[in-house]
Amino acid sequence: MENVCLRCGRVLKNKKSINNKYGPVCESKMLKEYYSKRQITIDELLKGSAMNGGMDKSL
């Protein structure tokens, strides 16, 4: 079986990429997408803090 990127299908050439199953560019793009979806705004944080009595229990 050929070692190809699971995202774009290009042939993977270095050992790290082969182990990760993604090329460096695709890995970077995927991490950026992953973390950008999990960010919250300060308004969301303050709204959540106000809803639980002004104390953010997660801190």
Image (cartoon, rainbow, N blue to C red):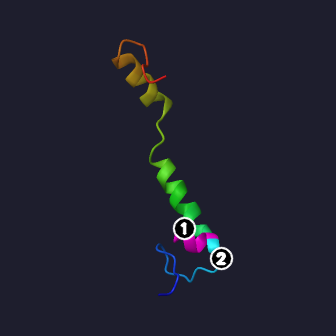
Q: Which residue is mark 1?
A: 20
Tell me if residue 13 is in the magenta stretch: no
Q: Quadrant of residue 26?
A: bottom right
48 on left or right of 35: left
Measure how far apart labels 1 and 2 are at the Cα level: 10 Å
Amino acid beneath label 2 = Asn
Q: Secondary structure at mark 1?
A: helix
Q: Residue furthest bottom?
A: 1
Give the camera-side residue of 41 and 33: 33
Tell me if residue 18 is in the magenta stretch: yes
**In the depicted structure, whether residue 45 falls above or below residue 55:** below
- Is most of the magenta stretch helix, strand or loop? helix
- Residue 23 visible somewhere in the drawing: no
Q: Position of residue 31 (x, y in %)?
A: 53, 56
Amino acid beneath label 1 = Asn
Number of the label disc, if any, that sits on residue 50: none
Q: Residue at x 45, y 23 (%)?
A: 46
Q: Residue at x 50, y 49 (%)?
A: 35
Q: Which residue is mark 2?
A: 14
Q: Position of residue 13 (x, y in %)?
A: 63, 80
Q: Position of residue 9 (x, y in %)?
A: 49, 80
Q: Quadrant of residue 54?
A: top left
- Magenta residues span 16-22
Q: Residue furthest right?
A: 14
Q: Residues within 10 Å of mark 1 (few under 14, many from 20)?
A: few
Q: Residue furthest top?
A: 53
Q: Position of residue 11 (x, y in %)?
A: 56, 83
**In the depicted structure, whether residue 58 falls above or below residue 11:** above
Q: Secondary structure at mark 2?
A: loop
- Residue 43 visible somewhere in the drawing: yes
Q: Residues within 10 Å of mark 2 (few under 14, many from 20)?
A: few
Q: Quadrant of residue 19?
A: bottom right
